[in-house]
Image (cartoon, grey):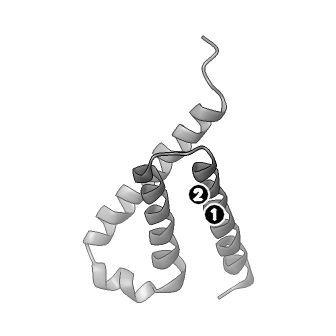
Amino acid sequence: MNYWVLTYLVLYVALCIGSIALDLHKRQPVWFLVGDSLAALFCIVISFIYKGLAVQLGYFLWIIVTISLLWEIYSGYHDVKAEFPDAE
């Protein structure tokens, strides 16, 4: 693994842990924590740890990646909306 890939992995894991810790601190529902954890775990396993799994999943991989990315977008929107509430 290149040093820049390892650096990105460490940064991504740190951000995932921080996001989950923030969700725990804000007492998010269990389903939200599970969604964040599964999306992060999936991205880490598929992208960095076990590339052979991506080959074995085949077409199903695109479905999982799409769901994971949509969850990350929703989670990010939810976190930004919670941090910066509407002025009205």
Q: How many marks?
A: 2
Question: What separation in Å lies between label 2 and label 1 (alpha carbons)?
Answer: 5 Å
- The reply to whether the C-beta atoms of the residues labelled 2 and 1 are less than 8 Å apart is yes
User: Can you say whether 12 is above or below 85 in the image?
Assistant: below
The answer to whether 57 appears left or right of 65 in the picture is: left
Residue drawn at 48 percent across, 78 percent down:
45
- Residue 76 x/y as whole percent: 55, 45
Check residue 73 in the rendering and tell me which mark sits there, or answer none: none
In this view, which residue lies farthest toward the top?
A: 88
Assign the N terminus to one quadrant of the image.
Answer: bottom right
Please identify the quarter of the rendering in which residue 62 is found.
Answer: bottom left
- Residue 27 x/y as whole percent: 55, 45
Residue drawn at 43 percent across, 65 percent down:
38
Q: Nearer the viewer, residue 33 or 54?
A: 33
The amino acid on which the numbered mark 2 sits, given as a three-letter code, is Ile
Residue drawn at 43 percent across, 52 percent down:
30
The amino acid on which the numbered mark 1 sits, given as a three-letter code, is Ile
Q: Which residue is mark 2?
A: 20
Q: Which residue is mark 1?
A: 17
Disc 1 element: helix
User: Can you say whether 50 is above or below 62 in the image?
Assistant: below
Residue drawn at 43 percent across, 59 percent down:
34
Q: Nearer the viewer, residue 45 or 22?
A: 22
